[in-house]
Amino acid sequence: MKGKIISYISAKKFGFICGDDGESYFLHVSSLLDKANESKLVKDVVVEFEPTETSKGLAAKQVHVPDVNFKKQLVAFFTAKSNQPRYGHVVARHTLSTRFFKDQNEGRSHIKQLAADIGCNAILNTNVEKKTFSGGGEDFTMYSFSGDFALVTEDVPCNNDAQCDESVAIINTNITAVAGQFQRVNRKEIKAKAKQLRKFNPLLLLGAVVILGVVFAISM
């Protein structure tokens, strides 16, 4: 039977195939006829297999993966507290820390907009820096958001080598563009943050810096 890969989690060595009969089949790497083809287990790749009924449900056995070309494309925008994506490949990474904000939601929106301005489709290794200042006879807290601005790609089946080569060229162009835009945006944020710190410098000894070990969430 033929079918398409629905999903495959390389870290767990399993995934699922949608067969020509419309049924979902469990796929384990051990069922590959050629284990070297594991890297080809990408969504929408067509494979051939022996449909098998097991005590736990339908499974794909004797899985054959034909020769296939892959093109690279950017994944949808996301943020993550980890320094690596759960899916995809990091092809560019630049670390940035924002100016301070009294409103955390404003800060979250700001760093998300910076990523868009730079041309990145992911923010990894996210963190928030919390600093307490004193001014006007009262204490107030401000927040600075940081993370690794990244370009993350995924492999998608394509028809020929030309499409593959074209996609690589496009991604390389994006990498170069992001590097230039990052320098401009990063300088702007560094200056803005330094200005804020100078403004409150006489009172900095009253401030306490706490690096939170939790990640901030940016709503999509």
Image: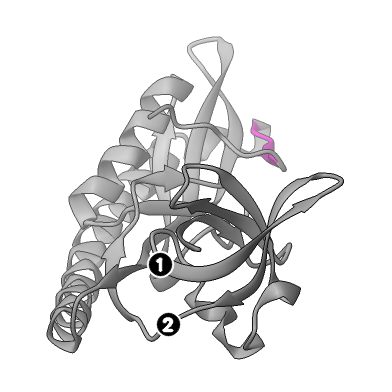
Residue 152 locus on image (x, y percent): 39, 63
Q: Nearer the viewer, residue 33 or 73?
A: 33
Label count reads: 2
Image quarter in which the C terminus is found: top left
User: Within 10 angstroms of label 2, few (less than 14), some, or many (20 or more) residues?
Assistant: few
User: Within 10 angstroms of label 1, few (less than 14), some, or many (20 or more) residues?
Assistant: many
Q: Is residue 14 left or right of residue 125?
A: right
Residue 81 in view, yes or no:
no
Q: Which of 86 and 104 is in front in this view?
A: 86
Q: Which mark is residue 66?
A: 2
Distance, label 1 to label 2, CA atoms, is 8 Å
Bounds of the magenta segment: 207-212
**Quadrant in the picture for residue 212:** top right
Q: In this view, does 8 lie above or below 36?
A: above
* Element at label 2: loop
* Element at label 1: strand
120 drawn magenta: no
Q: Which of 14 and 150 is in front in this view?
A: 14
The amino acid type of the residue labelled 2 equals Pro
Q: Which residue is drawn at 43% across and 27% down?
A: 219
Q: Residue at x 68, y 38 (%)?
A: 214
The amino acid type of the residue labelled 1 equals Val
- Contact (CB < 8 A) between labels 1 and 2? yes
Residue at the spot of label 1: 46
Residue 170 locus on image (x, y percent): 15, 74
Between discs 1 and 2, the one toward the N terminus = 1
Q: Is residue 35 above or below residue 94?
A: below
Residue 57 locus on image (x, y percent): 76, 44
Q: Residue at x 29, y 57 (%)?
A: 120
Q: In this view, does 99 lie to the left or right of 174?
A: right
Residue 109 locus on image (x, y percent): 34, 30
Residue 176 in view, yes or no:
yes
